[in-house]
């Protein structure tokens, strides 16, 4: 049964056809040493962006632009605000968006620590918030994300299974415990509708309940 599940997971991972401009950004990310989201996760967040008809998106953790390109692939009319503390990452992402012929007016790059930037952003103003940075601060970022999301908006947390460690009760490091707690608590929270996908290294999806 384990091998059967592994085969299903492998098939799902390999079935995604990544658009050429995103594949190029992925290669640049790997050369930089950034760790882009899996293509299978990218395709899923693109579907969620499309289904939401997203117009305003916040991304915490720009990397080299792979996740941002996937989000805009799904939401061609959205404006993406992307935050990263590494100027080199932002520069590479800016080039990736330019190469993909995404109008400059559809992207907003913010250099800085998310913990400092997020409190200054308008609450209940965004359709999607993607959190892919500083896993040790994931709970704080999710709290900010839910504040920024409009009613019916969604917060997305890729890598939620932390290299499979979250599913192993023996693993007790701080990040694993934080993610495990986040998953368990959001499943029980009346404030969100929560779902955990096992695609890639896990994608936690939290849709803010309409007030």
Image: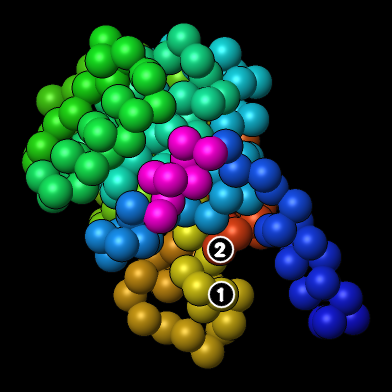
Q: In the image, is 88 to the left or to the right of 174?
A: left
Residue hosting label 2: 201
> Which percent across, then down, holds residue 198?
66, 59
In the depicted structure, whether residue 121 falls above or below residue 61: above
Disc 1: which residue: 164
Judged from the image, the secondary structure of the residue bearing numbered disc 2 is: loop
Q: Position of residue 42 (x, y in %)?
A: 55, 43
> Looking at the rendering, in which quadrant would you find the N terminus?
bottom right
Query: Residue 124 in the image: x percent, y percent?
Result: 36, 17
Sequence-first disc among 2 and 1: 1
Q: Which residue is drawn at 31% across and 62% down?
A: 31
- Residue 11 sits above or below residue 140 on the image: below
Label 2 environment density (alpha carbons within 10 Å; few <14, some 14–19, many ≥20): some
Instruction: Using the image, tell me which numbered label, if any, was put on residue 15.
Output: none
* Residue at the image point whose x is 75% and y is 52% from the top: 15
**Residue 112: where, in percent of width, then height?**
9, 41
Q: Neighbour class for label 1 at 10 Å: few (<14), some, many (≥20)?
A: some
Quarter where residue 6 is shown: bottom right
Report the front residue among 13 and 146: 13
Q: Which residue is drawn at 34% across and 23% down?
A: 80
Residue nearest the observer in this picture, 30 or 4: 30
As helix, strand or loop, the secondary structure at mark 1 comes to loop
Asked if residue 21 is among those painted magenta in the image, a careful observer would answer yes
**Whole-Å distance between the Cαs marked 2 and 1?**
7 Å
Q: Quadrant of residue 177?
A: bottom left
Q: Is residue 153 visible?
A: no
Q: Contact (CB < 8 A) between labels 2 and 1?
A: yes
Residue 28 highlighted magenta (yes or no): no
Q: What stretch is highlighted in magenta?
A: 20-27
* Residue ID at (69%, 48%): 16
Q: In this view, does 50 lie to the left or right of 173?
A: right
């Amino acid at each position: 049964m384990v091998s059967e599940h592994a085969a299903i997971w492998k098939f799902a991972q390999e079935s995604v056809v990544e658009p050429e401009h995103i594949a190029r950004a992925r290669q640049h990310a790997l050369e930089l040493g950034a760790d882009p989201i899996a293509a299978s996760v990218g395709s899923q967040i693109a579907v969620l962006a499309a289904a939401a008809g997203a117009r305003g998106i916040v991304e915490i953790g720009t990397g080299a632009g792979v996740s941002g390109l996937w989000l805009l692939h799904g939401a061609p009319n959205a404006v993406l605000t992307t935050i990263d503390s590494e100027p080199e990452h932002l520069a590479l992402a800016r080039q990736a968006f330019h190469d993909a012929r995404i109008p400059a007016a559809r992207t907003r790059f913010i250099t800085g620590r998310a913990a400092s930037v997020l409190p200054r952003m308008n609450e209940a103003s965004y359709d999607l918030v993607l959190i892919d940075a500083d896993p040790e601060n994931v709970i704080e970022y999710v709290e900010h994300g839910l504040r920024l999301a409009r009613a019916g908006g969604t917060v997305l947390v890729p890598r939620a299974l932390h290299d499979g460690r979250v599913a192993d009760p023996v693993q007790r490091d701080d990040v694993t415990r934080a993610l495990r707690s986040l998953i368990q608590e959001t499943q029980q929270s009346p404030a969100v509708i929560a779902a955990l996908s096992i695609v890639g290294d896990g994608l936690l999806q939290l849709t803010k309940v309409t007030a």
